[in-house]
Amino acid sequence: MPTVLLVDDSATDRRMIGGVLERNGFAVRYADNGSGALKQLHRSQPEAVLTDMQMPEMDGLELVKAVRAHYPQIPVILMTGHGSEALAAQALQHGAASYVPKSQFNKALVDAVRHVLDLAQADANYRRLIDHTKVTDFQFELENDPELIEPLISLVQQMVSGMEMCDAAGRLQAGVALEQAVINAMQHGNLELTSEQIKEDLEREEGVESIIDQRRREEPYKSRKVFVRAHVTREEARFIVRDEGAGFDVQSKLDVSLGDDENAGRGLVLMWGLMDKVVYNNAGNEVTLAKRGDAIQESAEPQIEVVDPTDAGFVPAENPEDGGPPQKLGELVPLDGGKSIMLNQPRLSVGRDPSCDIVLAHSDVSHQHCLLYMYGGWWYVKDLRSANGTRINKIPVDQKRIAPGAVLMIATHQFEARYSPWDLGAVGITPPVDPF
C-alpha cells in the first residue's frame, strides 16, 4: 500500500482529502506545515508528498525546494487554491511533479497521485548500459493508442536518469511534460477532441463507447500519426512532438494559467511549468520541449526578470543597431477604422504631446499617456498616470503584458495588438509567472 504524506494547515481539508486517499487504497500520514513534513520525512519516507501551497512557517514552495534538495526521489504534488497560482507556478519550476486544483480534488486527486507514482517507478534493468551512453536520439511514429505512451515515457526517463543529466525530480518532470505533449497531440491534435468532449468522455455511463475509441476507427483521424523525437545528452533533454491534425490557434492559448478549469489547458500549464523551454510552431501542431541538465541549470540566468522600463539604465536587448532600417515588431490596428500604427522600436512613448513616438491627437489622451516596450519577445504597456487610464481587454492596468490579439485601450481608443512573440525571440508559450 503506497504511503502519501499530506501537508495542509487546515484540519478540515486534511480530514476530507485524507479520507478520499484512504478510501482509495493509500496509507496517509499528516503534517500541518512544511517544517512538520520535513521532520516526518527524516524519520521515514513516503512514496509521495501532497502539499497545500499557502501555510505558516514553511509554505509549499519552500517545502518543494527542501524535498528536491534532500529527497529528490520523492515526487511532490501540489494542491492549488484561489490566490496560490503564482506560488504554484514557481513550485513546478523548482521540482514539483504535478498539481491538482483543490476545487477538483474529489474527481482528479486519486488519478493524479496514482499517475505520478506510476511514472516515478524507474526501471533499472538497463542502468549499467545507460551509464556509458553519451548521446541518445530516438524517433518514434505512434498510432493514436494511449497504451503506447507509458512505455515511451518509461524509456525516455531511463535515459534521462541513467545519463545523470538531472536528479530524480528533474527526470520525473521531463516525463510528465513529455507525456502531456503526446496526450495533447493524440487527443486534441489527431483526434480533434475538445477539452469539453474529453471531460464528458471520462464521465460517460458504463457501457457507453468512448469517443476516443470511436475516432480511432474513423477517417481522417485513424490514419494520423504522432511523431516523437527525443534527443538526450548529459547537458540537455530535447523533445519534439508533432501531430497530423489541423493544429490550433496558438495565440488564443497564450494566457492559460493554473487558475483555469482542470480540463482546459492543464497539459500546457504542466509543460511550461516543468520544462525550461516550450515552443510551438505557427501551425500549432508541433511543440519543442527542452530541459537543461543540473550543471547547466546552476549557471543559467533565469528566463523571467523583473525590470522597470522607466529606469534610465533599461536598454531592451532587441534594440536595432543605430542607423538601421525601421523594423516591424508588430502593429496596433484601430478597431474603429483608420491606419494601423506600426511598432518599429522596442520602446515607444504614447500620448498627445508632439514629442511622443506615437502621437494620438485626442483630447481624452494625456500628454504622456503610456509607454509600450518589448521584453523577451513580448509587448508590455505601462500607464504613466494618465487621466483616463489604459486598459487591456477592458480591464484597467498599471503595467502588464499585452498578449497577441488582445485589445489595448488608450483612454477611449481601442487597438488590436498584432505580433508574433516567437518571431521576436520569445521562449515558451507564455511566461509562467507575470513579472509584474
Image: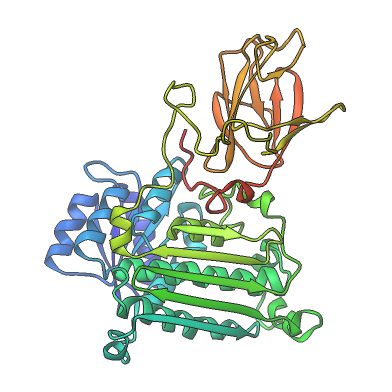
| Quarter of the rendering containing residue 346 | top right
Residue 322 as seen in the image, left or right of residue 365: left
Residue 14 in view of the camera: yes
How many numbered circles are shown? 0
Q: Quick one: which residue is furthest to the front in this view?
A: 323
Q: Quick one: which residue is furthest to the right in this view?
A: 337
Q: Is residue 376 above or below residue 175?
A: above
Q: Is residue 393 above or below residue 188?
A: above
Residue 284 as seen in the image, left or right of residue 75: right
The picture places residue 290, in percent across and down from the top left corner, at 46, 64
| Quarter of the rendering containing residue 125 | bottom left
Residue 152 as seen in the image, left or right of residue 329: left
| Quarter of the rendering containing residue 295 | bottom left
Q: Is residue 6 above or below residue 113?
A: above
Q: Quick one: which residue is furthest to the left in this view?
A: 43
Residue at 31% from the left image edge and 50% from the top image edge: 60
The picture places residue 417, in percent across and down from the top left corner, at 71, 36
Quadrant the N terminus occupies:
bottom left
Residue at 12% from the left image edge and 66% from the top image edge: 43
Residue 132 or 334: which is nearer the viewer? 132
What's the coloring here?
rainbow
The picture places residue 408, in percent across and down from the top left corner, at 69, 29
